Each structure stands twice: as structure tokens, then as C-alpha cells.
Image (cartoon, rainbow, N blue to C red):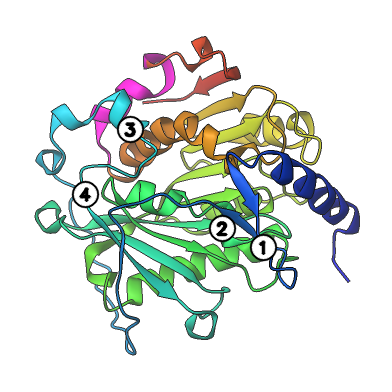
Amino acid sequence: MPKYPFYSQWIVAIGALVFSISASAVTLDEVAATNKLTIKEQSTKIVSTPIASAVVITSSVSAPAVPSNCIADSIITAANLSDTRDKGPFSVAKKPVPRQLANGFGGGTIYYPTNAGGCGLLGGIAVVPGYVSYESSIKWWGPRLASWGFVVITIDTNSIYDDPESRAAQLSAALDHMLRDNTVGAQIDSTRLGAIGWSMGGGGALQLATKRQTVRAIIPQTPYHDKDYGEMNTPALFITCQNDRIASNKKYSSRFYDKATGAKMKIEIKNGSHFCPSYRFNEILLSKPGIAWMHRYINGDTRFDQFLCSNDNYGNNPRISAYDYKNCS
């Protein structure tokens, strides 16, 4: 039996309704055996690579952050960061991670830049979905961030009913998998990692940040967690939805935001339900702050400050109902 029956009923019932009436953004997979939520993919730059049969352990020695000349100043614009066609400065390849080869999580997909050889070691990011949800609901972050110079793994969980603590452990396992992978492991700086999670996955990202010091930035999206995960001082970009009836802002997101002691920023999407981070038409809202946040706090690239905190007033956007920031530096 699911551990959170009431939460599950809300997710399944409301999720089915919302995704069915938002066909322009998200479609419901007709494969009844899985009930899998599928985001429509649009990418002309992604190619597949074969699955390797062996892995290697990469060195844990820290390397300098990505050189500033790796991404030209002229590329770092609001329009480019908001481009929903995954057209960052780098071309992207993807590599599937079958469930049977995944140790500690339910499989997924690795996205990585193919032409970033002159950029030094790159940051690595893991992304996890929410309760009774699948990789497809958060998969868009993979090619988007990879096209901006990160190695990203988007994952399925061992069980769709896994709680936030389990999702934190699976995020960590997914990061470890990337660091060991023989295709991308040598490209990643093991001291510059990040995590993104939606719903219970957002709670998992918050908890992971308290356990793994090499996680330098997180993006919890409509986060849910029903336990005390401890003090969290990792830079965090909170994505919330104004009409969230499943993990209400007052009970969860706002409390987690107030509790965070590090650099933090919060964007609330107007009229959004609990599922608003997964809508394709909201990607343009989330891409710019999401990419900028990860570059600023994983890579220490201050050129992205112009899109964060006091330097970019997201509150003037009619599709954003609330905006706040604290401790930015």
C-alpha cells in the first residue's frame, strides 16, 4: 500500500485532470499499463550514444570552475536563457541509463555537452520527479541545462511511492552514477554538483543538500516533505505555484523557504496548480532563473547575477504572482 494514500489520491486525480486539459503543454501517455506522464519533446540537437558496459571512477580532486571565456558574454542574454528549444551554446547528446544498470535509483537519461572540451570540468546535476510521477515530468531540464554546459541526469525512482528521504538518497545515487560513468564521468567536477526535484522530489533535493556538501545549488519545485530535514544553507531557487492544493505554499514551500539560511530566491507562478513546473508553457519562466542559478552557485559565475535576486525584477512579469529573495551574494 502507498505510504501517503491521501496525497496519492490528490496527485492521481488532479494530475489526470490537469494534464488532460493542458494538451498544448503536456500529454497523457495512452499506455494504460504505466499511466506515465509524458512531456512532448522538441529537440533537433540531441543524439543518442550507446550504453557502455563498464564504468571508471573519476578523481575527486577539485578543479577550477568553468572558465569565463567558455561561454561568451554575448551569449548570456535573457532571450537565450529563456529559449525553450534547448539552444544554449553547446550541442547535446544523451545516454540512456536502463533500470537494470542503475544502482540505487530507477534508471534515467544522461544529457551532456559534446563540444565543451575547452571548458574544463563541468558541474553535474541530478533531477528527480514527484510522488506517483515519472522521469518524463521533469525530463525537460536535462537537455536545457546540458545545452548550457552541465552534465545532467534525469531519473525515475525505484518506486513511484518513494518518500522524500528515499528520493534524496536516489538523487545522490544518480550523481554517483554520473561520476562513475565512462562516457561523462571524466567531464564532471565531483565537488560542483546540484539537484532539482519536483513535489516529494523537491523535498528530496532539500534533504540531499543537508547531507552532501558537494551539492552547491538546488531547485526545489513545489517541494513536499513531512519531516524535519535539518538546517539547509545550500543556495536554493524555490519554484512554487499559486493555487497548489496538494503541497500548499503556506504549509510547505513558504516554510521551507523561510527556514533556508543560504542564498535563496522564490518565484511563484500565477494561477499555477501543483503541476505547474511541468507545463511546457512555463518553461520560458523557469529556464532563465534556473540556468542562471546553477551557473551562479555551482560554477561561481557572477555574470549570471544580472538575472537573479535584485537585478531582475520577476515580480513585474504578469505570469508571476510572488517573488522574493534573500542572502544573495
Measuring 72% from the left and 39% from the top, which residue is drawn there?
A: 21
Numbered badge on residue 136 = 2
Helix, strand or loop under label 2: helix
What's under tag 1, amino acid-wise?
Lys
Q: Residue furthest bottom?
A: 53
Report how far apart the C-alphas of labels 1 and 3 lie in the structure: 29 Å
Q: Could you tell me if the residues under marks 1 and 2 are in contact, i.e. CB atoms within 8 Å? A: yes
Report how far apart the C-alphas of labels 4 and 2 lie in the structure: 22 Å
* Side of 161 where 263 appears, left or right: left
Q: Could you tell me if the residues under marks 1 and 3 are in contact, i.e. CB atoms within 8 Å? A: no
Q: Which residue bears the numbered disc 3? A: 81
Report how far apart the C-alphas of labels 3 and 4 lie in the structure: 13 Å
In the rendered view, would you say 253 is above or below 176? above
Residue 187 lies, in percent from the top left, at 23, 64
* Residue 268 belongs to the span the image colors magenta: no
Numbered badge on residue 90 = 4
Q: Nearer the viewer, residue 232 or 88?
A: 88
Report how far apart the C-alphas of labels 1 and 2 lie in the structure: 8 Å
Residue neighbourhood size for the residue with mark 4, other residues' Cα within 10 Å, grouped as few (<14), some (14–19), many (≥20): many
* Side of 327 where 279 appears, left or right: right
Numbered badge on residue 84 = none
Q: Which residue bears the numbered disc 1? A: 36
Choose the circle earlier in sequence order: 2 or 3: 3
Helix, strand or loop under label 1: loop
